[in-house]
Amino acid sequence: MAGEVKIKLRFNGVWREVETRPDRILLDLLREELGLTGTKKGCEAGECGACTVLMNGRAILSCLTPALKADGAEILTIEGLAEEGNLHPLQQAFLEKGAVQCGYCTPGMVLAAKALLDANPTPSVEEVKRAISGNLCRCTGYTKIIQAVRLAAEALRGDQRRKDEPAEAVKQAKTAVYP
Amino acid sequence: MNTVSSEVVGRSVLRVDGFEKLTGRACYAGDIAFPGMLHLKLQRSDRPHAKILGIRTAEAQAYPGVVAVFTCRDIPGTNRIGREIPDQNVLCIDKVRFIGDPVALVAAETPAAAEAAAALIRVDYEDLPGIFSPEEALAPGAAKIHPNGNLLMERTLLRGDPERALKEADLVIANTYRTQMVEHAYLEPEAGVATFIDGKMTVWMPSKYSHFDQRELAEAIGLPPAAVRVVNATVGGCFGDKTSLSPGYYAALASLKTGRPAKMVYSREESFIATRKRHPFIIRHTTGASWDGRILAAKVEIVADTGAYCASGPTVLVKSLIHAAGPYDIPNVSMKVTFAYTNNPVGGSMRGLGVPQVTFAHESQIDILARELGMDPFAIREKNGFRPGSVTATGQRLGDSVSLVETLATVRAEVARIGTPPSTGSKKYAWGVAAMFYGIGAGGRSNPGVARLEVDTAGAFTLFVGIGDVGQGSSTALVQIAAETLRCSMGEIRVVAGDTDLCPDSGVTAASRVTYIVGRSVQIAAERMRERLQEAAALLIGAAPESLRVENGFFLSQDAPLRQVSIAQAAAKAKERGIPLVAEGVFDPDFVALDPKTGQGEPMATYAFATQAALVAVDTGSGEVDVLTIVASHDVGKAVNPDSVTGQIEGGISMGVGFSLTEEILLEGGRIRNPGFNGYFLPTSLDMPDTVSLIAEVPEATGPYGAKGVGEPALLPTTPAIINAIHAATGIRVKELPATPERLWRMLRDRHQTSSCSTPGEQ
Amino acid sequence: MNWKAYKRPEGVAEALTLLEKAAGRGRVIAGGTDLILQLRQRERAADLLVDITGIDTMKGIGEADGWITIGAAVTHAEAADSSLLRRVARALAEGCGQVGAPQIRNTATLMGNVISAQPAADGAVPLAALEAEIRVVSTAGERWVPMDEAYLDVGRSAIDASREVATEIRFRKPADGEKTRFFRLSKRKALSLPVLNGAVSILPDPSAQRIRRARIALGPVAARPFRARRAEACLETAAISPELIDEAARIAAEEANPRTSLLRGGAPYRKAMVELFLTRTIRAMLAMERG
């Protein structure tokens, strides 16, 4: 198709080639060409954080990012967080702490938190607040979200200790929804 | 009523919809797409009040990719919407009444084409005088916004002899309070998708009341209700809106006319401009008291801007009337509440339904009273506060689930434990306290909750309720109630919510009624279901049904202890015997409608109570207010899911922080000057205080396992607690919201110049 | 959105060639957080976007020959986290750290902030106080644009992003003993433009009794970051005292002359805040000095 360009994006270790328009915005590419509707559109003006994804490990606003800027980049969306059906400790912690209400801010919020924990495994409450300060939430008042991120940090440190130990591997992530 | 031991109710079980929301699988209306789908865009009025002389659509119709352009003439149905008075249109007919009033609709192959074409629609207007305040609206000779004039509704309340009581009072305090227009600002912008196949219209949209939207939509666009199915998509926040006129209606219209699927998503700016807002109130509140701190009389006059259309004006008016005197034993009360139309954005339902506004006023009044009398703010509230058996301003005698005093004591103890940092130089620290009461349910009218439970022969239950979870956790709580009653695990119950083809009409998600009213109907349905299964199990066991009990999904009898029957086996037996595998529950709380003149009646079956205290740090140089901590004690009767309850409290607090300090729709000549998150400031994570949420449980006998509700109460005391704290810290009494730094700075500066601070009207 | 091509050159020369071919219809994009919004809202238009963030020579913050240099592709997050900037130009690191939100800081570049030419720029205001200059390259050669010449008007930069590529920012490394600080007043603690921001640089004389050199930049009080030169002069005239600071702050408020704005507030308030925040900031800086 005239005017179409091809870009390559790496999702969870897998390269995908997508054909799109040169003026496509990453958020629309994710939601439409790739059918990954987990990343949300809240304002399309970079003011709410609902569209947050990780690009090369850094939290960015996909509503303000040209798709071509992401050419060759590693992208993590909420759909890519759970591995082989096992929830990531962040997802598990959000569930356990009751940090999800309407869920619309949740994908962006979880990814902003992941970027934090990847860079800082022992964040203070203040550091957690700052890391999610670009993600608006109207339902939760942020309280349980902050608790969930700290719980996940603990769980990840625990996982890391277990990984470092020469004991048998322990499967940590859980899939149960009901206790 | 309460069971022996709670297995599920009272535990913070994981949300039934949490997994989908956390993995990106939850389906919101904006995520839905169909092949061949049309995209829609409205042209909306750019002026506040005008006659429509003509609409020229030829240029838009000719735009490449446009399939159709619709105006009011293209609507086969009534084109009328409005839950209380149908004075609004899907597409305007002869007038526009606010900036954003929808005039014409474009359906196109792409969103870009729809947007470009919508801009090409030419409307010929004849401007009419714009009216932007209730005072202007009610002045004689004012231009009429609606044919019957600009008064939407006025109600009064009278109890005792307030005029005489005020004359005889030792102390009379009168103040005028103003609250601002506020936006729901849920993170999910409104969206709707429709298909019209074989004469059946299906609409996916977030809705707080699918059945109402189904009926209204059907009538408006000209279909029999049975031909319309509304399916509640995952709701990305509601707070009172996401009902009635919304993108789903336009999608249905386009689908009906073209036969193709259609989708519409509001932009954030459109969501700000076009959807309903919290009513701004002007409250004149007069309190008369004796020297020993007893409130003898309250006189409240409220004038509210209801905006261009009726929407939920009457509901908000009545709720304000019921609550305006506060949770206090006041023998003499008079009220007059007046709602006027203007050409401002439409006032609708927003969390609290007028009660946040009046709570701000009555909690400021009692705080001022306390200071005048040198009384402790907790003590004065305790002295006057409702107790079981107290009589409200509407003359209703309260039942047993009244725990205002307990919440006051809890908060007072926690505040003392936390303490107050020392004030230094320009940084002043202080606590402020506020209490509230809130009637659960619509107020003075029938609003039944209905639930239906079904079971299959594999032992799996399905719970059908009309209301969808708007994020507050209602589906989870309802499943908990059902599981508790059926003595089975959560995993055995699937909930289907908000689908008008499958679910009964359970009323609206509003007024904090879901846990109490719909929850009770779920409990009743579950009790009936258990009885039926018990009957069948008894046949299998060979014992009397009354001797059976249920444990962990099995029926057991002490008469035949070795025989166990699973739910699946009981269901299969029931089917064989023709015992229905379905049970319904209905609960419509008792009420006595309010007398239109005296406002006397028993509008709600139960009330929630709460106290909150706020610790603030005020920078007296810049006027900036930092809310450091909020202590909240809420009586919810029974916390079905404690984490959901505290989650509501925390969310309500953040809304209260915004309401008191940062949120304001800025209007100029009816135009919203800040229709976006860059100009309308919700609290971020860095703005949110620490919270201590303490749940009090004084069971409500008529509620499921004693539960009442918490959704709106969560927000009510926060604002006055903060405003009272600002006064405690600085001596500045803010009577106009929001208490922005500039407003505070000006009041602090003026205080040096004058000694009185009772005139409002700044900014 | 409407642009027809999006290119990511690997070098400046390539970027310039692309722009030249586009004959004025192309535009440099860095992080894009301002530009994409402007394009979406049709405040600007472009057929070609030239993304310079992949050019290696534009990354990195360094020190050489008494200059601190910041590449055009450096983000606010990188500037805020830079140990060099935190050490020698604290106001700049602080300002960059308070832009918008983490996601914006991860993408938006400091250079982009200057070229956007918005008066309320948390990166640009400290650069003005540091008297930074910008290296601009075009087919005609290269030039250096000082901060106080970089703004033509609100939203209009002296750097023409359709023909020129700004490659780096530099400023003279502050002298030993020179302190800088940043302050900001906004409507909430994240995701909001400043109501008022400012950067102050103070170099006391060796006796610590007087201020040898003061620089004060303020925003958004004018179409560009505003240097309060009369206030600066006042601070340099006399021995340090609370009265001197108060006087300088008062003068700054007067010369800045902020006007009433719907979103930022009334003029009297904004003036008073200029005075208040400058007083507090300078006092804090000098208390540090003495301590």
Image (spheres, grey):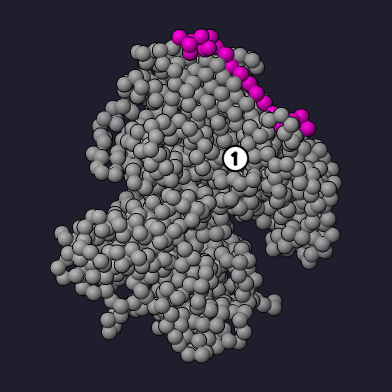
Residue linked to disc 1: B277
Question: Mark 1 is on which residue type?
Answer: Lys
Q: In the picture, residue C170 is in which quadrant?
A: bottom left
Residue C225 percent location from the top left of the image? 43, 66
Q: In the picture, residue A99 is in which quadrant?
A: top left
**Is there any visible trace of residue B382 in the rendered image?**
yes
Residue B154 percent location from the top left of the image? 65, 23
Kindly identify the residue that appears in the image at 59 percent across and 72 percent down: A18
Residue B234 percent location from the top left of the image? 58, 46
Q: Is residue B522 above or below residue B687?
A: above
Q: Please check the rendered image and state whether residue B163 is part of the magenta-colored stretch, yes or no.
A: yes
Instruction: Look at the image and give the residue range highlighted in magenta.
Output: B147-168
Q: In the picture, residue B380 is in which quadrant?
A: top left
Q: Which chain contains the residue that carries disc 1? A: B
Kindly identify the residue that appears in the image at 45 percent across and 88 percent down: C142
Kindly identify the residue that appears in the image at 29 percent across and 83 percent down: C64
